[in-house]
Amino acid sequence: MTNRYCKNSEETRPLRESLTHYFHSKNKIIFMLELKQIVIQDPRSETLPGACFGFTLQNRVFQERINCLEGTHEFFEAVGFQKALLPVPDQEGPEEFYVLSEAALAQPRSLRKHKEQLLVAEPVRATLARQRRVFRPSPLASQFDLPGDFFSLTAEEVKREQRLRSEAVERLSVLRTKAMREREEQRERRRYTYTLLRVRFPDGCLLQGTFYARERVAALYAFVREALQSDWLPFELLASGGQRLSEEESPAFDECGLVPSALLTFSWDAALLEDLRAAGAEPDSSILKPELLSTIEKLS
């Protein structure tokens, strides 16, 4: 990091070694701990007497690779580092440092605890809000008004690329190979970030949710199952043309053409229907939970 104010005495060696070990980790989510340690001694400072551990905030590694990480400063302050302006040799003005407080230095167990927590920590991943909505039966079920952030490209870029691709397809329709078609499909999939999916139930009601284009079909099955009154009964989801979506194989939405939007059909499992009808019964006409039906909207 830097050797300014570095004091390599036998007195401080165990503490330096302990902190050096603490600040090195293979865990990529605590990359900030790649900082090397120094011992700052500022005999002219009344607020930092004696030897203290710390580093300058102007260090290139800190500025380029650590300062930009969310939670960096909260982490250092939680460990016990405090910001302080210290004079630097051969420099006119003082420089801002993070220095480890005397209270933190006096509690090595606390430092070890911070280390252990960081070593086992997992990054907090953002969860996409499904924005669940329920609509009344509507002839507009297959019409979608998608926001711009559903696309990796702008709307203008998408239109331009579609036009160019259509022209190219016309020219090469006879000569296209399987490899060419696969490359084109891959480019198509990369265009979309999200997909808006609607599921139409036997009574015509629609359940809508937002998903990542790369999510798996199993996520849609789970989403629908959470909305059912009888969530233990087996069911199927059918894409356009009656194609059954397999929950077991669970392809990604962008792999089975369900981007950037799609209308699917809900159907009870065929074997279940046969058993019910053999017993002279039919599935309940009301499939969705009452609390969801109480929020039903008109699709416009």
Image (cartoon, rainbow, N blue to C red):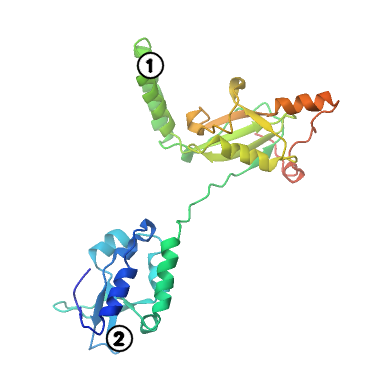
The image quadrant of residue 34 is bottom left
Q: Quadrant of the N terminus?
A: bottom left
Residue ranking furthest to the right? 280
Name the foreground residue: 125 vs 205.
Answer: 125
Asked if residue 27 lies left or right of residue 206, the reply is left
The image quadrant of residue 135 is top right
Q: Residues within 10 Å of mark 2 (few under 14, many from 20)?
A: some
Residue 99 x/y as whole percent: 31, 77
Q: Which residue is mark 1?
A: 169
Q: Residue at x 44, y 61 (%)?
A: 120
Residue ranking furthest to the top? 174
Q: Which label number is shown at residue 24?
A: none
Q: Which label number is shown at residue 48?
A: 2
Asked if residue 94 lies left or right of residue 230, the reply is left
Examine the rendered structure and indicate whether residue 230 appears above or below residue 204: below
Find numbered disc 2 in the image and state the secondary structure of the residue it sits on: loop
Residue 2 x/y as whole percent: 20, 71
The amino acid on which the numbered mark 2 sits, given as a three-letter code, is Leu
Examine the rendered structure and indicate whether residue 72 appears above or below residue 135: below
Q: Give the mark, 1 or 2, whose residue is nearer the N terminus.
A: 2
Q: CA distance from mark 1 to mark 2?
A: 72 Å
